[in-house]
Image: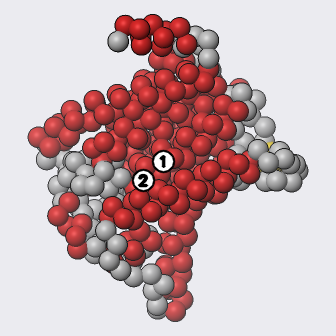
Amino acid sequence: MSRLLMLVFSLYPKYPSFQLFVSLSLAMFLCILLTPALIKFFTERKMGQVIRTDGPEPHLKKQGTPTMGGIGIILSAAVSWAAVSATRGFSLRGFLILGVVLACGLIGLTDDYLKTARRRSLGLKARHKLILQLLVSLLFSYVAIEYAGLPTYIELPLTGYVVELGLLYPVFVYLVIAATTNTVNLTDGLDGLAAGTVAIVSAALAAIAFREKLPDVAFFAAAIAGAAAGFLWWNAYPARIFMGDTGSLSLGGAIAAISILTKTELFLPLIGGIFVIEGISVILQVLSFRLFKKRIFKMAPIHHHFEMIGWSETQIMIRFWILAGFLAGLGFALYFTGGL
């Protein structure tokens, strides 16, 4: 053990790639160790998930499972990022990601608290969430552009061309943050599905940030990936705790902020393709029913459709992870395939 520690201490200051590994690993183990305390805390206070009565019938047995586990993910990622950054020096970009994570997490925490306090599956209204996300996006845009030097253009994938948005860029940032947070939230409907997918997507973004020589952003992305993976220890089927909107909104905010700071906004729909599929399935279901009074899927988001046709939660989770890994890998490969 002493030799292993000596090796770690010798490699850490020399190799940023090893620091990236430490950021991921520390966040993962912190989340594994911290989450049981959250399970106990929320169980004792009977702060459990309120299940929709119109959802899949097998989900009704999950009623009362502790929620708001996203608190552990946020704390683990933040502590890991801070510990690694302290040895290299903090940056405004890192604090920008942290700010979005905390702000979106607070929105989610409020939503989760209202659900548990009211003992119903409805918390904040959708329009209130969107308004709060707009405020977060505008503040993030202002600080990133004015003080972190974030360019106001977007890069067109595989073309080498850029489009200058100027004053419209904050609107674009809002669309990215709102779309990502809410689609991650939609994905969080099965044990382990959102956490595993977030870990895969964040790992791909960490690799991109590292290759682009943005170590501060890469360390935070790696910490998010590690914390999400650590949460899976307790969230995999059958889940002992759910991340809640506290987790899904904060993780979505982190992915969006990292994508914006690495200028991979237009690659995010591919890298985070599972989130896009989940979001589109809901949009198509709503439009089809309103226009034609017919449903395309047995239930939306699409992971519930597969439940309804007989797939187990574990089957859906593993198969969606496989697809998520393929899409994230493809997005990573295409990002470094000329033109950019």
Quadrant where the C terminus lies? top right
User: Mark 2: few, some, or many residues within 10 Å (few <14, many ≥20)?
Assistant: many
Mark 1, secondary structure of its residue: helix
Residue 40 at x, y percent in the picture:
16, 37
User: Mark 1: few, some, or many residues within 10 Å (few <14, many ≥20)?
Assistant: many
Q: CA distance from mark 1 to mark 2?
A: 6 Å
Amino acid type, mark 1 = Val
Residue 67 at x, y percent in the picture:
26, 48
Is 15 in front, or is 274?
15
* Contact (Cβ within 8 Å) of mark 1 with mark 2: yes
Residue 13 at x, y percent in the picture:
58, 10
Is 257 in front, or is 14?
14
Left or right, 13 with respect to 294, comes to right
Amino acid type, mark 2 = Ala
Q: Residue at x 67, y 52 (%)?
A: 331
Q: Residue at x 43, y 49 (%)?
A: 196
Q: Residue at x 47, y 17 (%)?
A: 83
Left or right, 257 with respect to 63, comes to right
Residue 109 visible in the current orientation? no
Q: What is the quadrant of residue 54 in the picture?
A: bottom left
Mark number displayed over residue 198: 1
Which residue is disc 2 drawn over?
194
Q: Residue at x 46, y 90 (%)?
A: 294
Mark 2, secondary structure of its residue: helix
Quadrant where the N terminus lies? top left
- Asked if residue 15 is positioned above or below residue 245 in the image, the reply reads above
Q: In the image as oriented, which residue stretches furthest toward the left? A: 44
